[in-house]
Image: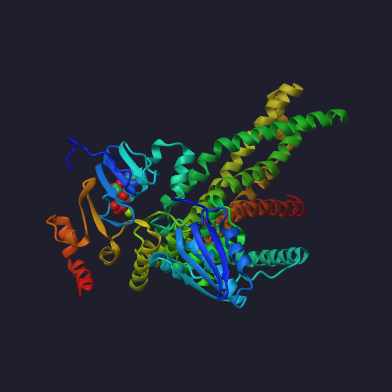
């Protein structure tokens, strides 16, 4: 990327970011970040802890103010359009927060119904059925629907939160460390689920992850964050072969090699 | 590219053919109507084929409603099939295959019965609260006694921190409230007693009422609201974030680290605050007596001195540590009873304040009976 001649953001991309700067006080967490996520692809984000992956996600979602830069989500800049227009864009996004962020006063099924209730005019019966379908898709047993979030294990919270993120059949799904806290089998099922949904719904997936298995299994491309920008982007296999010190340590450590081999062999 | 979900139905000897078109997505207004129409139009046909080849967009909501229609027809005895679905759509229909979810069991109950059951449960809970409360009191006393026996385990910093929170920071509001109430009592006393020509006795009234009852009662209620809620919220959110569990697995006793310092601090703060309240109440009375009835402060305080004995003064102060203990007990116990949800935290804080104020008044009543019996 040549800062002297920045390319304009690409409205055809699912997400297009140019020259994004986000700072807290004096500390620049993101410093001139450029990024394109194509429609229908699964884009993984990796980077050391504290490199700003969550901040990037939250900035794209409009939850963190930016100092400068442009962000197009589905061709629109959320910060520069009217509130109703922004809501129309946000309705097409699904977000799975790092901690789940389920509403603790509502049952799991009511949590999934909440966005449908706000945005759609559905009969209560269909809404209830769809909520249970989404929960089943996310791999939760039927009896979890009427439990409260406090009664769920960490992995179940993630699944319930995914079901809620899928409630409106979004076009872009944001996942912040979706498989962290899941058992390996559960994490594998989660990957398969994302892959199926992507195939059938044409979903674009923006996924922050530390899970190398996930990266190799479902990501079309991976972007590595470092010093406030994207330092490398490409298919996981290409990134694994790159020369960057952090990347090679990340991919060629014991765990990285095992994950890569599992996919080849 | 976008269009409302539509279909055309045609019949031949083999059965019905439903050609679906448009976008069958969850956002489409007509989705449910159209899906119901699918069933209506072809009900009774021996075979129904869903032709999906012209469907534009499809999502899980759409696939679910289409499949629900198909299953309804199948249940009515038709042989049903999909035709012409693209690979993606077929996969989606497979993923969102209709199944009847067991409706959550909701037994029909009468409102009256529910109401009675709630009342019974509340009574049982209240009974349980007393038992648990007494047990809890025992543990706190044992902890405090152990701390007294081994002063090295006494959490001085924690106690002094809470002493500042509960004590020093409450002085202005407590002084203000009691100053006002002392004034109000004096004004009412002067006004009402004037018709008997007994105006000077208003001063006795202020002195006795403030020192015996109002000072300690108002202070306790204020502390139940101000410090009790803070204690419950603080301990409750620690409970929610597993901080209490962390304390336990470190081999520490939450009773000693969390409950005892707060109870001790409150027991020290409340008598001191009650003294402040008493003084403020008397001064409030003095001001009103002077400005409203023309009783000069010198006369006012001489009368006070004549009207009250040490026992009047002490009977208020003696109650304060008991009030403090009850407030601290209720607040810490409600805090430790918080469950995992934010809602439960809110409920517990409310409970804590309501129960503490109630108990403060009950205890005050018990003391009134006791002091009357022993002529104190
Ligand atoms: N609200 C905030 N205020 C100040 N600093 C923040 C805030 N949110 C994040 N940061 C800082 O931004 C950096 C990136 O955080 P984050 O995006 O959470 O990292 P990660 O890549 O592990 O998700 C961290 O150094 C963090 O301390
Ligand atoms: Mg993070």
Q: Quadrant of the N terminus of chain A?
A: top left
B146 lies left or right of B191: left
- Residue A136 against residue A50 in the figure, above or below: below
The image shows residue A69 at horizontal and vertical percentages of 29, 38
**Depth check: A154 or B119 in front?**
A154
Q: Is residue B96 left or right of residue B38?
A: left
* Location of residue B153 in the rendering, given as x and y in whole percent from the top left corner: 41, 59
> Going by the picture, which residue comes out furthest to the right?
B196
Can you say whether B160 is above or below B135 in the image?
Answer: above
Which residue occupies 60% across, 40% down? B275
- Residue B252 or residue B117, whichever sits in front: B117
Residue occupying image coordinates x 83% and y 31%: B193
Horizontal and vertical percent for residue A190?
37, 67
**How far across and how far down the image is residue B95, in percent?**
44, 69
Residue B265 seen:
yes
Indicate the quadrant containing the C terminus of chain A: top left, top right, bottom left or bottom right.
Answer: bottom left
Residue lying at the far left in this picture: please name it: A243
B267 or A5: nearer the viewer: A5
Does residue B350 lie above or below A83 as drawn?
A: below
Looking at the rendered structure, the number of numbered marks drawn on it comes to: 0
- Residue A24 location, quadrant: top left
Residue that lies at the very extreme toward the front in this rendered image: B13
The residue under the point 14% across, 54% down is A244
Can residue A24 be seen from the camera position used here? no
Residue B124 appears in which quarter of the rendering?
bottom right
């Amino acid at each position: 990327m040549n800062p002297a001649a920045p390319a304009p953001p690409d409205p055809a991309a699912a997400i297009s970011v140019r020259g994004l700067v986000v700072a807290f006080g004096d500390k620049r967490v993101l410093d001139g970040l450029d990024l394109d996520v194509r429609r229908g692809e699964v884009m993984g984000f990796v980077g050391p802890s504290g490199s700003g992956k969550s901040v990037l996600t939250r900035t794209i979602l409009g939850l963190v103010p930016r100092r400068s830069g442009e962000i197009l989500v589905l061709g629109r800049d959320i910060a520069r359009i009217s509130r109703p227009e922004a809501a129309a864009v946000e309705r097409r996004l699904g977000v799975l927060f790092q901690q789940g962020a389920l509403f603790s006063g509502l049952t799991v099924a009511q949590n999934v119904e909440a966005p449908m209730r706000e945005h759609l005019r559905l009969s209560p019966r269909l809404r209830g059925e769809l909520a249970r379908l989404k929960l089943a898709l996310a791999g939760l047993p039927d009896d979890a629907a009427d439990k409260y979030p406090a009664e769920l294990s960490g992995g179940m919270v993630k699944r319930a939160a995914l079901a809620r993120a899928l409630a409106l059949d979004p076009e872009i799904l944001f996942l912040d460390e979706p498989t962290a806290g899941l058992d390996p089998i559960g994490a594998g099922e989660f990957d398969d689920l994302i892959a199926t949904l992507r195939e059938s719904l044409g979903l674009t997936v923006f996924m922050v992850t530390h899970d190398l298995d996930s990266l190799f299994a479902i990501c079309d491309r991976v972007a590595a964050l470092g010093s406030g920008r994207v330092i490398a982007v490409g298919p996981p296999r290409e990134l694994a072969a790159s020369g960057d010190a952090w990347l090679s340590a990340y991919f060629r450590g014991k765990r990285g090699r095992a994950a890569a081999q599992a996919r080849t062999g | 590219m976008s269009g409302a979900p539509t279909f055309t139905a045609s019949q031949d000897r083999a059965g019905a053919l439903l050609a679906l078109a448009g976008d069958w997505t969850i956002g489409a207004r007509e989705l449910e109507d159209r899906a119901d129409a699918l069933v209506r139009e072809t009900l009774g046909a021996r075979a129904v084929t869903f032709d999906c080849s012209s469907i534009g967009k499809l999502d899980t909501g759409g696939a679910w409603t289409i499949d629900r229609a198909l299953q309804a027809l199948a249940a009515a005895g038709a042989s049903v099939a999909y035709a012409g679905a693209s690979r993606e759509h077929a996969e989606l229909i497979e993923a969102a295959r209709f199944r009847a979810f067991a409706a959550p069991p909701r037994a029909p109950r009468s409102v009256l019965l529910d109401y009675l059951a709630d009342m019974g449960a509340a009574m049982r809970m209240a009974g349980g609260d007393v038992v648990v409360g007494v047990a809890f009191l025992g543990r706190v006393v044992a902890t405090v006694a152990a701390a007294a026996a081994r002063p090295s385990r006494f959490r001085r910093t924690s106690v002094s921190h809470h002493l500042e929170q509960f004590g020093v920071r409450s002085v202005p509001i407590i002084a203000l409230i009691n100053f006002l109430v002392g004034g109000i009592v004096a004004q009412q006393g002067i006004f009402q007693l004037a018709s008997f020509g007994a105006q000077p006795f208003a001063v006795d009234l202020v002195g006795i009422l403030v020192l015996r009852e109002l000072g300690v009662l108002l202070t306790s209620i204020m502390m139940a609201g101000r410090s009790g809620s803070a204690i419950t919220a603080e301990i409750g959110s620690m409970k929610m974030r597993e901080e209490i569990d962390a304390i336990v697995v470190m081999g520490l006793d939450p009773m000693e680290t969390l409950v005892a310092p707060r109870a001790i601090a409150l027991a020290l703060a409340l008598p001191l605050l009650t003294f402040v309240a008493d003084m403020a109440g008397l001064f409030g009375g003095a001001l009103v007596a002077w400005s409203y009835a023309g009783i000069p402060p010198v006369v006012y305080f001489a009368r006070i001195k004549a009207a009250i004995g040490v026992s009047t003064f002490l009977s208020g102060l003696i109650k304060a540590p008991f009030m403090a203990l009850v407030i601290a007990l209720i607040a810490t116990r409600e805090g430790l009873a918080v469950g995992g949800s934010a809602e439960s935290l809110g409920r517990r804080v409310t409970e804590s304040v309501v129960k503490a104020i109630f108990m403060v008044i009950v205890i005050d009543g018990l003391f009134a009976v006791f002091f009357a019996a022993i002529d104190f």
